[in-house]
Amino acid sequence: MGDQLAPYRRKRDFTRTPEPAGGRVAVAEQGARRFVVQRHRARRLHYDFRLEIDGVLVSWAVPKGPTIDADVRRAAFHVEDHPLEYIDFEGVIPAGEYGGGDVIVWDAGTWDSPKTDDPGAAVRAGELHLDMYGEKLRGRFVLVRTRSDEWLLLHKHDEHAVSGWDAEAHPTSVLTGRTNDEVKADPDRMWRSDLPASSASVALKPAVADGPDPDELAALDGFNRAGTWHVFGRDLRVTNLDKVLFPARDGEEPVTKRDLLRYAASIAPALLPYLGRRALNMHRYPDGAQRKGFWHKELPDHAPDWLPRWDNPEADAGETCTYLVVDEPAALIWAANFGALEWHAWTSRVDHPRQPTYALVDLDPGSATGWDDLLVLARLHRTAFEHLGVSARAKVTGRRGIQIWVPIAPGASFEETRAWVEGLSRSVGAVVPELVSWKWQKDERGGLARLDYTQNAINKTLVAPYSPRPAPGAPVSAPIDWSELDDPALRPDAFTIRTILPRLAERGDLFAEVLHSDQALPPLR
């Protein structure tokens, strides 16, 4: 296995590419071999034709794509074997990496070899006959070597042959029904090359169906003004359910505490990965967003015993000692019922509080910088990340700004992430100095924007993705796709607790890459 995949691994930097590195795999049973054909737009469009043989995917690049037209022969070029878990890889390989580009699973199915019990030996001998049972490719095919790594792929004259059949007339994925363009703009999955093969495929769009069941939501709606809500296996005493917490936007109803609790329960499955094993700073507004709020960090003595918590061993006298840790969905509902309208988790986990898991870029507008100016700064950061080959995700804040989270591998210090973000943002700011101020005091910035790298410090937080913000309509801090920075309709407070759940169900968690893409921050150059 290792020898077969050595050429594949030598060509790739697995700290940058989401492709699988390959691990231990089982050889398929006789008659159960699989195949995949991937439409791959790298430097040039081609089709990757891969057959499961002897525990790997023996692979050919077919520039014009396979065909079931029996009168057409296609050139095929034998390339390095790929790991078996590549069988359903659909996503984007970063620019600058070997094979960089977008990939869809154009066809997939099973195959068998009618003329040999040892297809590996047949490939080495230069001729393989195979019967294919795919969604697009069916019938008898032959692969014949003409010289060195150059082969011909052809379809025999049988009942499955179709004259004039062209792969480019069938451009969609058999997994998702999407085109390469759609996958490039919004990939469904990514690969973690540092994980075992069995778990290397990580969904970027978790289903929202893991939230509260309809009976639990009906119970909340059935309470008058208060009640004991049994939800996610916990009993929560909820009160003042009809109290207005967020004033109405024009043409809308105000948002009540009942609405907030329903939202907290519904968003919890998607939000918990960003809050779990992290101390939570709660921004409380017991009288609603129309009144002044305050920070509440210490878990109160009256909090139920089942709530997850963390005692900070480094807390000095007078500092917060015991923090809420939202390790289960009911804990988020408790925080919302406690009047926490905003949820701010630490960027480090409780087991390593001095080691951040993200580097943070905060684009903070000034009074003289408009939304269009902030978009310019965000696009410049996007270009910088592309140039550096760095994975990062952006979100609108729900107020006026944009934030970018950069996932990092374990071990970096806050001093390192702060210095790296400062260097990056100063390089970006130098391109448009008329938009940016580096003054610490807000009243000294002349209304210019601030690229705030100082949030990269212990116990400094940025609002969590999907957290509400204290403003009319209950806007939320919403993850966006990088391409949405070019959408003239984008606004920082466009998404609310009433609209974000349908968006999440339709587009998936656009922020999930920060959970699954550990990387070393590269030198700035």
Image: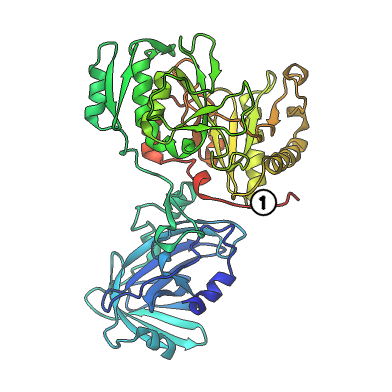
Q: Is residue 303 above or below residue 393?
A: above
Q: Is residue 510 above or below residue 84?
A: above
Q: Amino acid under label 1?
A: Leu
Residue 257 located left or right of residue 415: left
Q: Residue at x 50, y 74 (%)?
A: 5
Residue 375 located left or right of residue 338: right
Q: Nearer the viewer, residue 374 or 458?
A: 458
Residue 217 located left or right of residue 356: left
Q: Is residue 376 above or below residue 1?
A: above
Residue 440 appears in which quarter of the rendering?
Answer: top right
- Image mark count: 1
| SS state under label 1 | helix
Q: Residue at x 34, y 53 (%)?
A: 177
Give residue 359's position: percent from left, percent from top: 63, 41
Give residue 417's position: percent from left, percent from top: 68, 42
Give residue 364's position: percent from left, percent from top: 65, 27
Q: Report crowding for label 1: few under 14, some 14 to 19, many 20 or more residues within 10 A (C-alpha).
A: some
Q: Is residue 491 visible?
A: no
Q: Which residue lies under the disc numbered 1?
A: 388
- The residue furthest bottom is 125
Residue 234 appears in which quarter of the rendering?
Answer: top left
Q: Nearer the viewer, residue 48 or 8?
A: 8
Q: Nearer the viewer, residue 463 or 353?
A: 353
Q: Is residue 142 visible?
A: yes
